[in-house]
Image (cartoon, rainbow, N blue to C red):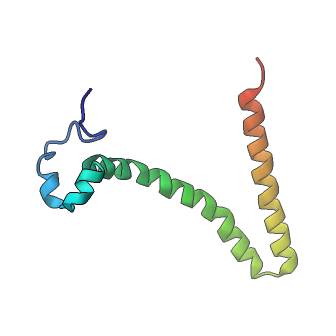
Amino acid sequence: MSSAPLLGAGEPFGECREAKRPSPAWLRRLIDTEEAWAQLQFALPMVLTNMSYYAIPLVSVMFSGHLGNVHLAGATLGNSWATVTGYAFVVRTGIAPS
């Protein structure tokens, strides 16, 4: 089994990367810093996507809060209903017998 990092297999500067990001000796003994760095680079787009996904309802609720309490309650209920209904629909279609 190879100990090559997940995403660093095709990189031409794989050897130079250690010199650019020095890490303490105790950290290198504890975890594989090169693999951790590769996985963090791989996970960053997914984290940003999830944050953006949750920011859309947040911004709409914030904007409707400036209009008044009734508008704020309506926007919050609408976002909650759409989220729960959409989630139930996706789960229902994913496990439906064929």
Which quadrant is the N terminus positioned in? top left
- The picture places residue 49, in percent across and down from the top left corner, at 52, 54
Q: Is residue 33 at all visible to an observer of this figure?
A: no
Residue drawn at the location 16% of the way across and 45% of the way down: 14
Toward the right, the furthest residue is 70
- The picture places residue 12, in percent across and down from the top left corner, at 14, 42
Which quadrant is the C terminus positioned in? top right
Q: Is residue 93 left or right of residue 69?
A: left
Toward the top, the furthest residue is 98
Q: Is residue 23 left or right of residue 52?
A: left
- The picture places residue 67, in percent across and down from the top left corner, at 79, 81
Residue drawn at the location 65% of the way across and 70% of the way down: 59
Give 96 or 37, whichever is nearer the viewer: 37
Asked if residue 32 is positioned above or below residue 48 in the image, the reply reads above
Asked if residue 3 is positioned above or below residue 16 in the image, the reply reads above
- The picture places residue 96, in percent across and down from the top left corner, at 77, 25
Residue 89's quadrant in the figure?
top right
Residue drawn at the location 81% of the way across and 74% of the way down: 72
Q: Is residue 59 left or right of residue 11?
A: right
Q: Is residue 9 at all visible to an observer of this figure?
A: yes
Give 94 or 57, whichever is nearer the viewer: 94
Asked if residue 96 is positioned above or below residue 58 in the image, the reply reads above
Q: Is residue 97 left or right of residue 19?
A: right
